[in-house]
Image: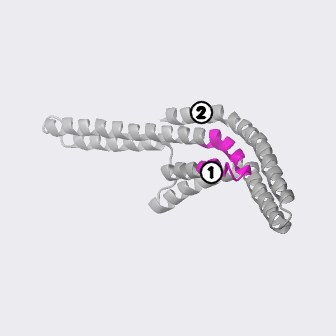
Amino acid sequence: MDIFESIISQYNTAIGSWETTAIQLASRLFYVLAGIQLTWAGILWMLNHNDPLYHLTEFIKRIMVIAFFWTVIDQAGTWIPAIVNSFRGFGSEMSGISFFSPGDVGSKGMAIASTLVHAAQQGGFLEKFAGAVLGVIVALIVVLAFILVAIEMVLVLIGSKIILIGGLVMLGFGATQWTQDFTQKYFVACIHVGLKLM
């Protein structure tokens, strides 16, 4: 069942170079949008002579929000995987089963199938031919079911990695109040991926 780990490893290697590029793109987008946001806040502050303190306060709040989202971009390589892995940890704690890989799932299926075939042979193959045939058929079904679960797990792991790394660009939209929804949706996607892996 090392084939599953090999596939995941190949995708992780291919996708690994995306993270740096995605963070660079997010940073550039962030700078442009932060400049627009701060310029807009400054214009409003200058135009409103009646209550400049209010606009100064809003300007400072904007800078704090921008600083927060810049920190998120700067720490994305650490924080985003931590969010996803925390859900995997919750699943592990709740089930009492430590992390397992798709290869582990396939191996468990083979072990169960082996036990079924061994049990079917114990009764005497010629005496209980129907039971032996049924045992082999059930063992094949079990192996196929576990392999399908392992394949689904590979697809989830690869798909989640593509979504999480490719979506890092969305963090750049956190710089303005008009585009922060895109960044929030990216965090929602991270939580969905974490729940799926849980």
Image quadrant assignment for residue 124 = top left
Q: Position of residue 28 (x, y in %)?
A: 78, 40
The secondary structure type at the circle numbered 1 is: helix
The secondary structure type at the circle numbered 2 is: helix
- Provide the residue span drawn in magenta: 164-186
Identity, as a three-letter code, of the amino acid under mark 2: Tyr
On the picture, is 38 further left or further right than 140?
A: right
Is tag 2's residue or tag 1's residue first in the polypeptide sequence? 2
Disc number for residue 69: none
> Which one is in front, 123 or 86?
86
On the picture, is 84 further left or further right than 141?
A: right
Q: Position of residue 25 (x, y in %)?
A: 74, 38
On the picture, is 22 further left or further right than 143?
A: right
Q: Residue furthest left?
A: 127
Q: Residue at 34% of width from left, 39% of height from top?
A: 145
Q: Residues within 10 Å of mark 2 (few under 14, many from 20)?
A: some
Is most of the magenta stretch helix, strand or loop? helix
Q: Residue at 17% of width from left, 40% of height from top?
A: 131
Identity, as a three-letter code, of the amino acid under mark 1: Asp
Judging by the rendered image, the residue that carries numbered circle 2 is 11
Answer above or below: position of 150 versus 44: above
Residue 153 is inside the magenta segment = no
Residue 182 is inside the magenta segment = yes
> Which one is in front, 31 or 122?
31
Which of labels 2 and 1 is toward the front? 1
Judging by the rendered image, the residue that carries numbered circle 1 is 181
Answer above or below: position of 175 versus 62: above
Asked if disc 2 and disc 1 are in contact, CB closer than 8 Å, the reply is: no
